[in-house]
Amino acid sequence: MKRYIPDWFISGLFLMILVAWLKPGIGMDLQPVHLGLVIDIGVVLIFFFYGLKLDPARLKAGMRNWKMHLAIQLTTFLLFPLLILLFYPLLKGTNLEMFWIGMFFLAALPSTVSSSVVMVSIAGGNIPGAIFNASISGIIGIAMTPFWMGLFLTGAEEGFDFSHVLVQLITQIIVPVVAGLFLHRYFVRWINRHLRKLATFDKIIILLIVYESFSRSVMSGIFFSVSWLALGGLFIAVISLFFIVLNFTGWMAQKMRFTREDSITLQFAGTKKSLVHGSVFASVLFSGISGAGIFLLPIMIYHSFQLFYISVLARKMSKQV
């Protein structure tokens, strides 16, 4: 029997939270290197490399199975947010509203790229469909995630300046993605040779963002006002959201009479949420907001659980083929 070895990135997330709790503010005082500047440069490079990975020809060819694509994107950017919106009247103006914003941020995020494709492949799903939807989801998310969050952060959170956020979105995300798309054909071989290194680079930047966000929250004292009961409730809410969407997408695939391959892709790609995009969007959308660490908690919980459960489910499905 093989011994279980935890993923270094998941372990790193918890380590960053612990370090932020014990020693907040490292590198945030401009000496010797400003952590915020490193993160800003890292975010630009993440989205530039993301644009380089996108193949315009494949994206165009992948648009044929439009019913499955539409079902996945509506699940990602409409079903998720609407499910969380139902609870806004109950939590608005309460001490739990910041947890609701974190949950809504999770709901507004695009799907993952690599893990969606890998899990669909293991389960025997529609791999080209998974690649197309994972890629297009990231592009749509550049517009949809700030749109959804702007509805509730403007005027609701001290320190949120939408004009400043818009400039950051354009310079740090949109421009690098477009530049990467234009340069794709010149660097496609280089990008394919260094995919693993680029994935590691993404994760390192995410760990720095997590540390900075939680450091600000610890230094502002916001975590000292949060009870363990509230955190437990947040964990239950995140896991419940995952299973609600997973079961709904399974039901939707039956009603739309999808093939087994398309049904797997709908369930796997439709339920995934990207911690990569969540972290980099948080560094832009929540810069200047003291409770940014709280807003990242739901996506961190969701990311860890989705990797565990979907990997188990994918292996189970692969044995049924």
Image (cartoon, grey):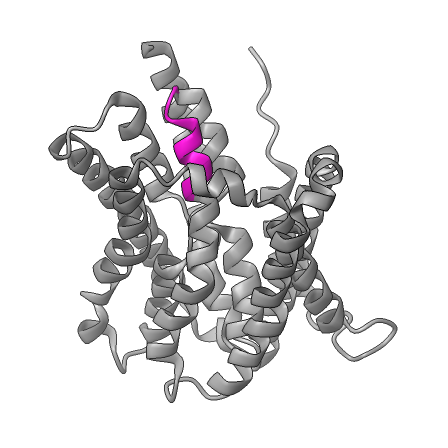
Q: Is residue 178 above or below residue 186?
A: below
Task: Give how far across and how far down residue 1 sits, in percent.
Answer: 55, 10
Q: Residue at x 35, y 62 (%)?
A: 103
Q: Residue at x 57, y 62 (%)?
A: 280
Residue 169 lies within the magenta run: no
Q: Main secondary structure of the magenta part?
A: helix
Q: Residue 77, located in which quarter of the rendered image?
A: bottom left
Task: Give how far across and how far down residue 130 sits, in percent.
Answer: 42, 35
Q: Residue 259, located in which quarter of the rendered image?
A: top left
Residue stretch rendered in magenta on the structure: 124-133
Which of 23/256 is in front? 256
The answer to whether any part of residue 310 appears in the image is yes
Left or right placement of residue 310 versus residue 80 in this view: right
Left or right placement of residue 67 versus residue 234 in this view: left
Task: Give how far across and how far down residue 7 sits, in percent.
Answer: 60, 35
Work out which quarter of the rendered image holds the C terminus and state it.
top left
Q: Is residue 24 above or below residue 19?
A: below
Which of 269/19 is in front? 269
Left or right placement of residue 105 versus residue 75 in this view: right
Q: Residue at x 61, y 28 (%)?
A: 5
